[in-house]
Image (cartoon, rainbow, N blue to C red):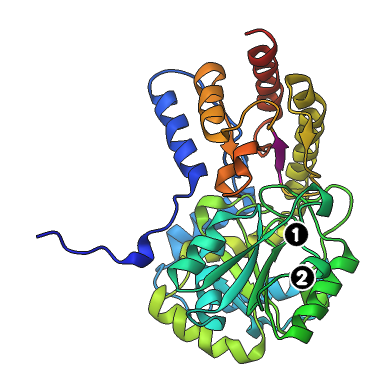
Amino acid sequence: MVLKIASRSDISPFIVMDVMRSANAREASGKDVLHLEVGQPSTPAPKSVIEAAKLGLDEELLGYTDALGIPLLRQRLSDHYKAYYNLRIPSERIIVTTGSSGAFILGFLAVFEPGDKVGITSPGYPAYKNILRTVGVEVIEVSVNEDTAFQPSVEILSNLDVSLDGLIIASPSNPTGSMLSVASLSEICSWCSAQKVRLISDEIYHGITFQRKASSALHYSEDAVIVNSFSKYFSMTGWRLGWMVVPDNLIRTIECLAQNLFISPPTLSQLAAVSAFDCFDELDSNVERYARNRSILLTELPKAGFEKLAPSDGAFYLYADVSSLTSNSETFCARILEEAGVAITPGIDFDTQYGKNFVRFSYAGETAVMVEASSRLRELFFNP
């Protein structure tokens, strides 16, 4: 007898992780790989964070913490909002989580009922829709493209043929790196408030922008749920630490969920992350490298045939229209990995309808990798 598997687990894979697995298998066979597939900084955590972690191992019990996080880290985050955004956010409204993934799970469970309709942009981060579907929420994919700078607008949202219960936005976004203007963000926040749509604002790429600083939805909404992370700007992906900013009336609800689902965020990561806010010079030097990498790819990728690139205002991604090169981005990426040793991500991970015509490049790695990858791609497509 074969026992059943719950239907809620029947979700799509996170394809970038499959690409990374294939790339790692290639490396294990002795072949080299240039990693442009995964959105992971190639730099370690800041030096002070690492030193704090070592001290924590020597001096701390590393037992459970409060489900909402250690008070000192929550206060440092509150101070960060005042210094960076000029926003006074009480530490009580800040909830430390097991990565941004833990924040999304807690947030979605706290504010959406099974059957609710939640809008996400397409292309967009695939885990949004997969987590939402797992908890019984109906996903409404809102198609955006180069005409809308790959971001939603009030006009687009108002013309949907369904009424939304929630909306997820990201600025800068994954996979494109595009950003909402201040005016557009304000308009979307006002629209959500007027329509009684719960807004979830993914702000994990704040700090990594190239023309202007990203603005938080907290400036324009009292009801938005904000998700952020130590993974990207703070260069701490494997430490699995994120945070949320929530309205007062959600604090106890999310605390109860966190107690039961996660007990507490990783203790060592929390102790170490307190020091991250003393490392902005080091972290901003990483952003300067991303800017150099971005400039190299914007110049060199068109020479390899990748001529249509989405606006990359922030994060560390370029989203390329490859419809002139292929009609199947998955096999296209597999070919590039096999023949050039360059790992990139097919667009179907981010857009099930049009993603076959797109690929994503991550430029979070070393500058030398960007130069070499560009050279290999140019050689592959122009010297077959």
Q: Is residue 255 left or right of residue 281?
A: left
- Give the quarter of the figure containing the C terminus: top right
Q: Position of residue 232 (x, y in %)?
A: 65, 52
- Quarter assignment of residue 247: bottom right
Q: Amino acid at mark 1?
A: Ser
Magenta part, dominant SS: strand
The kind of secondary structure element at disc 1 is loop
Q: Are marks 2 and 1 in contact (CB under 8 Å)?
A: no
Residue at the left extreme?
1
- Give the quarter of the figure containing the N terminus: bottom left
Extent of the magenta region: 316-321
Q: Which residue is mark 1?
A: 171
Q: Position of residue 243 (x, y in %)?
A: 60, 69
- Quarter assignment of residue 7: bottom left
Checking the image for residue 159, the label placed there is 2
Q: Does any portion of residue 241 appear in the rendered image? A: no
Q: Is residue 101 left or right of residue 181?
A: left
Residue at the top extreme?
383
Dot 2 or dot 1: first in sequence order is 2
Towards the viewer: 253 or 88:
253
Residue at the bottom extreme?
249
